[in-house]
Amino acid sequence: MSGPELVVLAGLQGSGKSTWTARTLAGTHTVVSKDHWPNARRREARQLRVVADLLAEGRDVVVDNTNPSPDERAPLIALARKAGVPVRAVWIDTPLEVCLTRNAAREGRAKVPLAGLLGTRARFVPPSTAEGFDRVDVVRGSS
Ligand SMILES: Nc1ncnc2c1ncn2[C@@H]1O[C@H](COP(=O)(O)OP(=O)(O)O)[C@@H](O)[C@H]1O
Ligand SMILES: [Mg+2]
């Protein structure tokens, strides 16, 4: 596409967001994720600042977080609007059981507590154009 875009991923922990991003967008888009600053305070504000700066520089940006609810996605949509950049959601729709299995196989920080994954699942609302996305793509994950 011509001109920069903001891509907002949505998907459970272990759904395959980072893998899909690396395969699909890493050559063109700057990847921003709160996971890059595991120990920073105010990671949310920091992430929004980084995204705003990159969009202002004319870069394509992808935000690789779970982003499960409209409330959590709204500030990103607002940033794109303010920058005059189209904003697209990519929903990595992988069955919960697959995410649970992948999560259980992970090591260290990458493995989240079961309650964290189930909490994300409970908050999860599929992204839609009704909340302001110009487009929503769905990627069906599998085992
Ligand atoms: N399409 C896929 N098929 C099989 N395994 C996958 C696929 N996508 C990701 N995985 C594996 O699942 C685990 C979680 O993937 P990751 O991309 O890190 O998920 P997320 O970023 O959503 O937490 C990793 O071990 C990864 O290798
Ligand atoms: Mg990831």
Image (cartoon, helix red, strand yellow):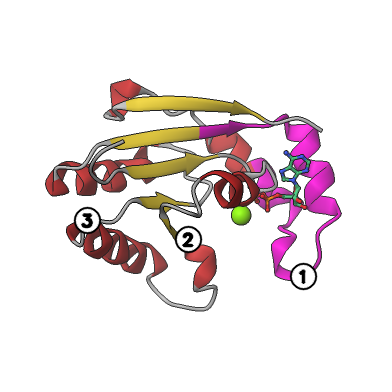
Report helix, strand or loop for mark 2.
Answer: loop
Q: Is residue 113 above or below residue 92?
A: below
Image quadrant assignment for residue 85: top left
Q: Nearer the viewer, residue 7 or 99?
A: 7
Quarter placement of the N terminus: top left
Give the mark toward the camera: 1 or 3: 3
- Indicate yes or no whether the magenta region holds residue 1: no
Callout 1: 10 Å neighbours few (<14), some, many (20+)?
few
Q: How many numbered discs, if any? A: 3
Q: Which residue is mark 1?
A: 108
Q: Main secondary structure of the magenta part?
A: helix
From the viewer's perspective, tell me whether residue 45 is left or right of residue 138.
left
The residue under the point 23% across, 59% down is: 52
Across and down, in percent, residue 107 comes to: 81, 66
Q: In the rendered structure, which segment of residues is drawn in magenta?
A: 91-118
Q: Is mark 2 within 8 Å of ligand 2?
A: yes
What kind of residue is marked 3?
Gly
The residue under the point 17% across, 41% down is: 81
User: Mark 2 and mark 1 in contact (Cβ < 8 Å)?
Assistant: no
User: Mark 3 and mark 1 in contact (Cβ < 8 Å)?
Assistant: no
Residue 58 circle label: 3
Residue 33 circle label: 2
**First in sequence: mark 1 vs mark 3:** 3
The residue under the point 27% across, 62% down is: 54
Q: Nearer the viewer, residue 142 or 118?
A: 142
Report helix, strand or loop for mark 1.
Answer: helix
